[in-house]
């Protein structure tokens, strides 16, 4: 599923950044990459955000994260407390999108929408075109 998703990103002219290895071996590594490469959409998992909140809580104080406009989380539901963590300790002016359901249909059932507000613990909208 992710291969199809990434290829479609390349078709739009985007540059895709992939990281291989454990991002928790050095908890700063993905945030440094975001700063160094000017990453605008940071895709991750709810489990990663949970682990970062425990092992590297002050991300926003240690990194500029100027270029990041969206943080997308998938793999499991993003709890309300992790929404709070992202907005309080990573970046206040970011669209945090919890997305769900993709592997079976190679798409997304529900996810983020740049035209709607974000509510803690909620997925913003059903996705079209399934």
Image: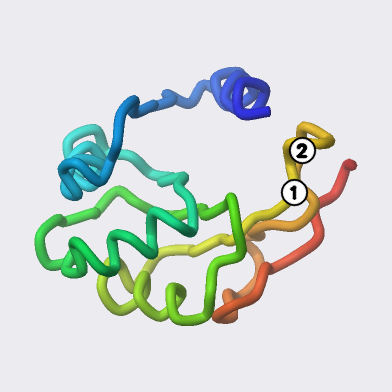
Q: Quadrant of the C terminus?
A: top right
Q: Is residue 45 above or below residue 125?
A: above
Mark before the other along the chain sequence, 2 or 1: 1
* Residue in front for this viewpoint, 97 or 25: 25
Which residue was labeled with disc 1?
101
Residue extending furthest toward the right = 130
Closer to the eye: label 2 or 1: 1
Q: Secondary structure at mark 1?
A: loop
Q: Residue at x 57, y 25 (%)?
A: 6
Contact? badges 2 and 1 (CB < 8 Å): yes
Please give the label number shown on residue 107: 2
From the top left corner, tell me how far across and down residue 122 is, in percent.
65, 75
Q: Secondary structure at mark 2?
A: loop
Q: How many marks?
A: 2
Return the x and y of residue 106 as percentages of the image width and height. Answer: 77, 32
Q: Residue at x 43, y 73 (%)?
A: 82
Q: Is residue 69 above or below residue 40?
A: below
Q: For this view, does 17 lie left or right of residue 52?
A: right
Q: Residue 127: x, y in percent?
A: 80, 53
Q: Residue furthest left?
A: 62
Q: CA distance from mark 2 to mark 1?
A: 7 Å
* Residue at the image point whose x is 48% and y is 26% from the top: 14
Structural crowding at the residue carrying mark 2, measured as other residues with C-alpha within 10 Å and reported as few (<14), some (14–19) or many (≥20) = some
Q: Residues within 10 Å of mark 1 (few under 14, many from 20)?
A: some
């Amino acid at each position: 599923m992710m291969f199809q998703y990434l290829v479609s990103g390349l078709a739009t002219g985007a540059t895709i950044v992939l990281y291989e290895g454990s991002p928790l071996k050095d908890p700063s590594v993905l945030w440094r990459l975001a700063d160094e490469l000017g990453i605008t959409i940071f895709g991750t998992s709810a489990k990663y955000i949970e682990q970062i909140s425990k092992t590297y809580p002050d991300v926003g104080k240690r990194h500029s994260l100027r270029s990041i406009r969206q943080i997308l989380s998938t793999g499991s539901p993003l709890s309300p407390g992790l929404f709070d963590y992202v907005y309080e300790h990573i970046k206040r002016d970011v669209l945090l999108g919890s997305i769900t359901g993709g592997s079976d249909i190679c798409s997304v059932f529900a996810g983020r929408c740049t035209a709607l507000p974000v509510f803690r613990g909620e997925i913003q909208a059903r996705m079209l075109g399934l």
